[in-house]
Amino acid sequence: MKHPFLATTAACLFTLATAQPAQADEGMWTFDNPPRAQVKASYGVDLDDAWLQRVRSGAVRIDGGCSASLVSSEGLVLTNHHCVESCLTQHSTPTTDLYANGFVSQRREEELKCAGTTLSVLVAMENVTAQIQAAVSGVPAAETNNARKKALTQLEGACEAAAAANPKMGPRKCETVRLYQGGQYWLYQYQRYTDVRLAFAPEIAAAQYGGDVDNFQFPRWCLDMSLLRVYENGVPAKTPNALHINFKGAAEGDPVFVVGHPGSTQRLLTVSDLEFLREVSLPVALFRNQELRGRYIQFSKLGGEQARITEEPLLSLENGIKVRRKQNDALLDGRFMAAKQADEAKLRAAVVVNPTLAAEIGDPWTANAAANAAYRNLYLDYSHLEGGAAFGGSQLFGHARRLVRATAEREKPNDQRLREYTDTRLPAVAAAVGAASPIPMELERLRLVFGLERARELLGPDHPFIQQVLGRESPDALATRVLATTTLADPAVRKALYEGGSAAVAASTDPLIMLARAIDGDARALRKRYEDEVEGPSATAAEKIAKARFAVLGTGTYPDATFTLRISYGAVAGWQEQGKPVVPFTRFARAFERHTGEAPFALPKRWLDAKGQLNLDTPYDFSSTNDIIGGNSGSPVLNAKGEVIGLAFDGNMHSIAGAFGYDPVMNRTVSVHTAAMKEALGKIYGAKTLLAELERR
Amino acid sequence: MKHPFLATTAACLFTLATAQPAQADEGMWTFDNPPRAQVKASYGVDLDDAWLQRVRSGAVRIDGGCSASLVSSEGLVLTNHHCVESCLTQHSTPTTDLYANGFVSQRREEELKCAGTTLSVLVAMENVTAQIQAAVSGVPAAETNNARKKALTQLEGACEAAAAANPKMGPRKCETVRLYQGGQYWLYQYQRYTDVRLAFAPEIAAAQYGGDVDNFQFPRWCLDMSLLRVYENGVPAKTPNALHINFKGAAEGDPVFVVGHPGSTQRLLTVSDLEFLREVSLPVALFRNQELRGRYIQFSKLGGEQARITEEPLLSLENGIKVRRKQNDALLDGRFMAAKQADEAKLRAAVVVNPTLAAEIGDPWTANAAANAAYRNLYLDYSHLEGGAAFGGSQLFGHARRLVRATAEREKPNDQRLREYTDTRLPAVAAAVGAASPIPMELERLRLVFGLERARELLGPDHPFIQQVLGRESPDALATRVLATTTLADPAVRKALYEGGSAAVAASTDPLIMLARAIDGDARALRKRYEDEVEGPSATAAEKIAKARFAVLGTGTYPDATFTLRISYGAVAGWQEQGKPVVPFTRFARAFERHTGEAPFALPKRWLDAKGQLNLDTPYDFSSTNDIIGGNSGSPVLNAKGEVIGLAFDGNMHSIAGAFGYDPVMNRTVSVHTAAMKEALGKIYGAKTLLAELERR
């Protein structure tokens, strides 16, 4: 499963823009600079403006971190099952478990509202690099970071205000995008859908058949699909730009295009950035997450209800572990690191022999290394206090922190706030505050205890933060005490605090609000140190390195992934694994052969019952050479005509190291075949109305 | 806590002998080559033969992996609390929990038998290098490994037979020792005590105050001590060679000596060996153990009984995690690796310019790298099937494997057996088979499920081993089935199978015996491949590299640690931690100040009750510059007169990287002060009889 935000550490924000010639099928290209020549040369396909315009307006971003596409003129949206998990768990209880049993609406009135889910469609793109450069020009170095953020906030605010004033436009959301590590800034405008409902999802056992064991593997047999529907004014939205599904799918060798929102790549980090990942942030995260995995698993074995509430967070955690583990392997590979060192040395040497360039940029590599050294010193304190690791991912602590921060920030002028609380982002903050998702208290307790126990180990029992938070309490005692009396699990309580503003939050005696308030000063101080000592100097250095790269290596390339719309190209193809060919298609028959009856290889009853009706030779999942990464989950896979012939849901194991570079020989995208969707919707799930809607042209 | 066998992977067996000039206070020296000149020069102390002979005959090895010393003429043995944990848990039940509550015998008849514990005192050492070299001389390369093992087994057997035939000698155990990576072979003869009883142990909360949080930290407040007594013929053994305890202890700057059994160091591994550790064995172990930690912790929170049975294995696991984590940090340090690369390049260059040497040894580094490459390919299969990782450390599976293997091997001629089942080792095997330690079924289940779930993930669900073992069962289902009917938890059942030999084992229908039998062929095949492709070539290469090292750098040094008797020297001293001095002593008062009442900072009731009687200024723990490593736990710390003035139980955090090299500035040994022992035995535990025995001269 590909999720977008796994590999993003602060260090990753300051990657270099690649300007090396791209490999065949490499690249997550922006729509202002599509790989027309490469596609024409490799596959004979013309990506003309009309084609690009058409697929762009059918591409959807699920703002929590996935991709999707509009697939009917009445608002149906196709995405992965694993992209709608929060909606499924919202509607699941011990007695009606949609996560386990799936959901099929036969009539629109049955469709289920997904609280907190918003979808965005990119409708305009504007290059604002000149405005940002003007805003920071002449500003003292120590102020550059703030000046840049302020200018970005102002551009976003002005864009949304203009849209609101224009009666012809619907509500717009405007987001600035930093491409090529600050080599370019863009302002993207999105049409936003906030009423999103669930129409179809299979059982988790079918969607993620093989569970974590098969995750990132291929061959694979997963129906990792779901259907949402966007609504406007209480009725299905009119979406005439929807893409058409071709249920025949594609054949081996066919050119295919993935249009979606890759989350984050780190392909041209400096050597110092990579060392930070390898020596600090990846090992720390892996060690923590492995332990949390053990706690989740042991807890989940206590019974059916414990298994139910743990399944989704556990699968998501395990997905992240697998991603980081393969990233870690890549960074421990001596040849990889040596190649990065050689590339960097070559670029630095090219700067030295170019006196004009050298005078302009100085030595940003040394500045970058100094910022990373500062981050090493700050990392444990910063990640525990400001990053919240000390609270183990507790959702309730997250609410408390959000309420304390959002109410305080909202009372400041827009361009003086922390960026996550600017006007552009406040609607999402309010939605998160009010979201009616159940918060299982036993899991909250597990996470809080885990976070505090590890914080005490890593910071030490005499650390001022540990002394302040724990005092003479153990992590177990603290968790018991605060969870016994907090009322933050109630959305109405949270909403009242949010609306009451900082005065209401200051008056609250909720123990989690009190905790978040008590540490807020120290956490903000660490944030400030991080911004001044790490983020600011790193950003400045990265912009200069990008300048060197553009000057020395040219500009005809794609930027690192930023969870913004991209297109990647390739062909349906397998690969050679340890000398043996991997065929690019799987078929239904083998899924039944692998059925053991025990999770994660237990096909749902509906599948076993329908077996006799199915064409077992139907293609199920397939692999292609497209260059994608977490965040692309749910992306439509298109043929040369722009028809949907697949649904990307994963990459093979080799694709994980794609964070650092694309390998055309081994890296493969894994997608659900459209023929499998039709077979399953029609014969297994009896979703005839939905299928008819998808087949209508 | 220092344990011996943490860092030993097969790759570690083939380390290089250091022959660089040692740093001040560096080295774990053998008794045939003590650091006389260095000690005289640094501290003015003469380590004459009489002194060395005296301390050697008072030094004890606890065969499970610790050190100790004889401290009364009637068989009292001083060691750490954490070295007698298996004895304490043997005698602990939900109602009488000696692990939690400690144990004080007031009369010898109350002393508790420690089943399976054996103690060894080194009584003779013989250099047998020439015999081994003769045994392999002229043997074809593919047969060298076997020929060497056979010769070692024969030497051990002949030594024990000679001792048994001599009516003046007690029973002897003879073990060959490989020093300097095969540069030398020795035959060590031990007097063996098999009747070992517990006389005193404090509460775990006092012995390991601060638990895992404070582990490897200093300042520290732990009474990590215990007293055993060795018996012969049912009465306390006469031990006239016992060391004397000086209850005044030592002052800052005093020269001190640690005499004990460091388990394993890897100070001169090849770069290829270090890369194997960094990229394969350390990450795999850390990821696994972190998850197991999470499972243990979550399980232990279910209730008092679950906490009780998990406490010891959890602390031990966490100790190993901390060790490996700091080792991992050391190996990820670019400067460390660069220094190793430079050293190796220098040695290789020196060989190239010496044609005689080059002709004799060839290029062992390339052979070593090839062996490591073979090990990378083999590692997951080998560690899961032959190493038993697939069974998660299940004690019952360990018994099953031991019974299947030992009965088969015992029926072969001694020198054709796997080395762990030779006549020298069979008494320990028999003791393990018959040991009456309780085996909590809930933990067995946890371990089996963990091992099988991870094996299925790492080997893949289609791996022949997974198909054979799991078939259509899930790990949970398999564990439930086999644990419901196995009778191997009963020592009498195991003893009957052991005595019944391979016929009894072949006839057994116990599900774990059947499992161990079913996979034995494949596991042995992997063992054979490991020995042929990895162990043998590595050993040959290591001997050649050792030869190069001796030729180029000389021979006046110490070998890597091998869990055999060593002496290290140094002084009572603190160090500077981030610019702040760490004082080398702690005192009782601060232990009470750190008491929160919540584990791991909850002093036992006996301590709180006795507080008024105690001299709170009594020195508690102290740090010194001695170079020690896991396995040294329980070692006596001696003053220049050879009196016991402390009890080594740990190192500071910087000592962990001591596996790879000694840092005189930061590396410190941590010991219990003898004044604290006296204060506690007398005033807290009322152990007046034992104290009087210790004070008698």
Image (cartoon, coloured by chain):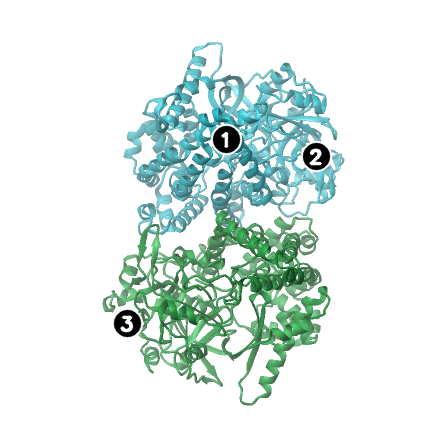
Chain colours: A green, B cyan
B240 with respect to B414 (left or right)? right
Mark 2 or 3, which is nearer the eye? 3
Query: Which chain hosts label 1?
Result: B
Q: CA distance from mark 2 to mark 3?
A: 75 Å
* As drawn, A370 above or below B55: below
Q: Chain of mark 3?
A: A
Residue name at image x 45 percent, y 13 percent: B163
Task: Locate residue B83, reporting x and y percent.
Answer: 56, 32
> Which residue shows up at 39% across the image and 43% down it?
B377
**Amino acid type shown at disc 2:** Tyr
Outermost residue to the top: B167
Q: Nearer the viewer, residue A155 or A228?
A: A155
**Mark identifier at residue B324:** none
Residue B620, disc: 2
Give the class, few, some or many, for how many residues have Cα within 10 Å of label 2's Cα (few <14, many ≥20).
many
Real-space CA distance between mark 1 and mark 2, rounded to the nearest whole angstrom = 54 Å
- Location of the N terminus of chain B by quadrant is top right
Q: At numbered mark 3, what does the secondary structure look like: helix, strand or loop?
A: helix
For the residues carrying marks 1 and 2, which lies nearer the camera in this image?
1
- Judged from the image, the secondary structure of the residue bearing numbered disc 1 is helix
Judge whether residue B111 can be spotted in this image: no
The numbered mark at residue B352 is: 1
Give the residue pinned by disc 3: A683
Q: Position of residue A18 (x, y in %)?
A: 52, 62
Residue A667 drawn above or below residue A254: above
